[in-house]
Image (spheres, rainbow, N blue to C red):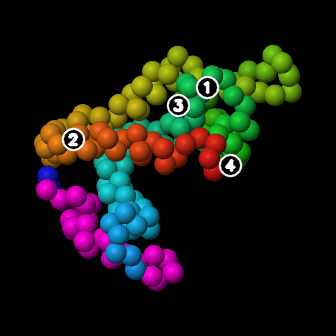
Amino acid sequence: MTDQPYPATGSDPAAHSAATDPAGATSDSPTDPAALAADLREALRPLWRRLGEHRTLSMGKVGILARLDRHGALTATDLAAQERISHQAVTGAVRELEEMGLVSRSPDPADGRRVLITLTDTGRTRLIGERSAGQEWLIHAVTDELSESERATLAAAVPLLGRLDTEGTR
């Protein structure tokens, strides 16, 4: 696996450079956005699945806990907007998280009509566990499957991947 630039599909860049875009045109560039997006999706899917095998909460619930950890108390409306999910989904998830003791609800001191959702100490501990789920597997995969130069390439790509979904750009 260490010599294949496209491990998810096992093919070489040339096979991906002649990718077809949604309109049916082909591109000869290995940096064609449509081909690169398809390759990235296919490469990330099995990795995300492997990491998810070790989680005990859904991605949505972990996202809510993480958002509360980063930003402090928020309303359900704020959570829905920031997590890009429906208000109904947030309400249901918060209810379940509250039943597990991972979040608490309280009136907003500035506006008693609003309810603030806060991460509890138990929720923070659980979030740490969820974030580390699959970490040992990933460490071993990076160590065993990638050369030192490939690890350097991957390290250089991490900030770029982070920029693909920056807050407030959509």
Residue at screen point 39% across, 76% down? 27
In space, the residues marked 3 and 2 are separated at their CA atoms by 27 Å
Q: Earlier in the sequence, mark 3 or mark 4?
A: 3
Graded by Cα atoms within 10 Å as few (under 14), some (14 to 19) or many (20 or more), the crowding at tag 2 reads: some
Q: Which secondary structure lies at badge 3? A: helix
Q: Earlier in the sequence, mark 3 or mark 2?
A: 3
Residue, disc 1: 71
**Amino acid type indicated by mark 2:** Arg
Vertical arrangement, residue 73 with respect to residue 130, above or below: above
Q: Give coordinates of residue 137: x percent, y percent.
A: 23, 39
Horizontal side of residue 31 vs 65, given as left or right: left
Stretch in magenta: 3-25
The answer to if 8 sits in the magenta stretch is yes
In space, the residues marked 3 and 4 are separated at their CA atoms by 17 Å
Residue, disc 4: 86
Residue, disc 2: 151
Residue, disc 3: 66
